Image (tube, helix red, strand yellow):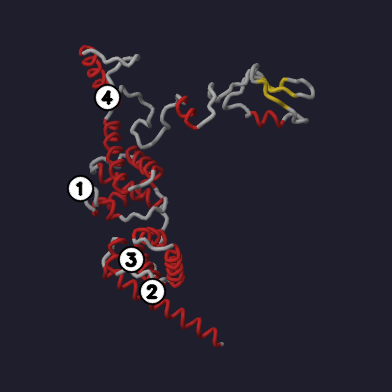
Amino acid sequence: MVIRPSEPSPEDILSKCPSGNIVLDEVRGEWICLDTGEVIAERVIDRGPEWRAFTAEEKEKRSRAGAPITATLHNGGLSTVIDWYDKDATGKKLDLKKRLELIRMRKWHTRTRMQSSIDRNLAQAMNELDRIAQQLGLPDYVKEEAAMIYKKAVEKELVRGRAIESVVAAALYAACRIHRIPRTLDEIAKYTKSGRKEVARCYRLLVRELGLKIPIVDPADYAQRIASMLNLSGATVKTAIEIINKAREAGITAGKDPAGIAAAAVYIAALLNDERRTQKEVAAAAGVTEVTVRNRYKELIELLNTIGLEEQRRERQ
């Protein structure tokens, strides 16, 4: 019996033996019961590498597998590429005739990789996605999520008649929201020529047509980022998150910009922990105006004073 992906795994085969005393004969490719001598499975396929490595460096050098499949490339990373070294297998420089032949081969190879309009669209979009993600310092898993969202939009023909960079930026913003990465729409739209209004329109279109489940933005995520940009301590971050939680319980965060709430909470926490920062510095780190920080600050201070008075009243009773 040959074990294939659709057949039971070796663990399933081992569980069928009452004694469980089974070993693998790597030379013959057989699972053998040591008690009865019965061959449980034969011609087992070894799906591991045919080489051994004793260090991480050896493993990296001997591995001949290609790059992993990724959604951030229009072809999933499965196509081949003709390199630009212009050298033969022995490392010698190619003559002029061979180099001209390789140039023509590369040109036609590139054309055959992107024959349809969808391939060309995806290739341009993935380049744009990589550019914006690098500018924002976003992790790879967010880029993967954004690429999958964009490909779904292409399949539903939502990109037709719209700027590619606007839809890419909207997909990136949706991916940031899904993975709770604190990036505002203004930050992402800043790296596009379309502007915030067009990116927001594409974002609403993607959410509506693709049925994306976008979680509610938590101001605590912004608080950690703002505190990091201002070089504040972990104690200040913890205090800011506690203030945000109290504000959420009181219901004063509904309908307000989470970045503004987070900025005011960080400002108050910095004052309480003797790490003073000006409202101008906090507003710049949060990407909001000083007026917003001031208004949210007044609301949070009033809430904290109310909570403090209530606690004092309870202690007296």
Residue corresponding to mark 3: 260
Residue corresponding to mark 4: 110
Kindly check if marks 1 and 3 are in contact, taking CB atoms under 8 A apart as contact.
no
First in sequence: mark 4 vs mark 1? 4
First in sequence: mark 3 vs mark 4? 4
> On the image, which quarter does residue 252 sit in?
bottom left
Q: Work out how far the residue at label 1 is from the one at label 3, CA to CA, in angstroms.
A: 26 Å
Which quadrant does the C terminus fall into? bottom right
Residue corresponding to mark 2: 300
Identified by mark 1, the residue type is Lys
Helix, strand or loop under label 2: helix
The image position of residue 74, as x and y in percent, is 33, 33
Q: Work out how far the residue at label 2 is from the one at label 1, CA to CA, in angstroms.
A: 37 Å
The image position of residue 124, as x and y in percent, is 26, 36
Helix, strand or loop under label 3: helix
What residue appears at the point 39 percent right and 72 percent down from the top-left corner? 274
The image position of residue 104, as x and y in percent, is 22, 18
Q: Is residue 62 shown above or below 298? A: above
Label 4 crowding class (10 Å Cα cut-off): few <14, some 14-19, many 20+?
some
Kindly check if marks 3 and 4 are in contact, taking CB atoms under 8 A apart as contact.
no
What residue appears at the point 54 percent right and 84 percent down from the top-left corner? 314
Identified by mark 2, the residue type is Leu
Pair 2/1: label in front: 2
Pair 1/3: label in front: 3
Q: Work out how far the residue at label 3 is from the one at label 4, CA to CA, in angstroms.
A: 48 Å
Identified by mark 4, the residue type is Thr
> On the image, which quarter does residue 134 sit in?
top left
Residue corresponding to mark 1: 193
Label 2 crowding class (10 Å Cα cut-off): few <14, some 14-19, many 20+?
many
First in sequence: mark 2 vs mark 4? 4
Q: Work out how far the residue at label 2 is from the one at label 4, CA to CA, in angstroms.
A: 58 Å
Q: Work out how far the residue at label 2 is from the one at label 3, CA to CA, in angstroms.
A: 11 Å
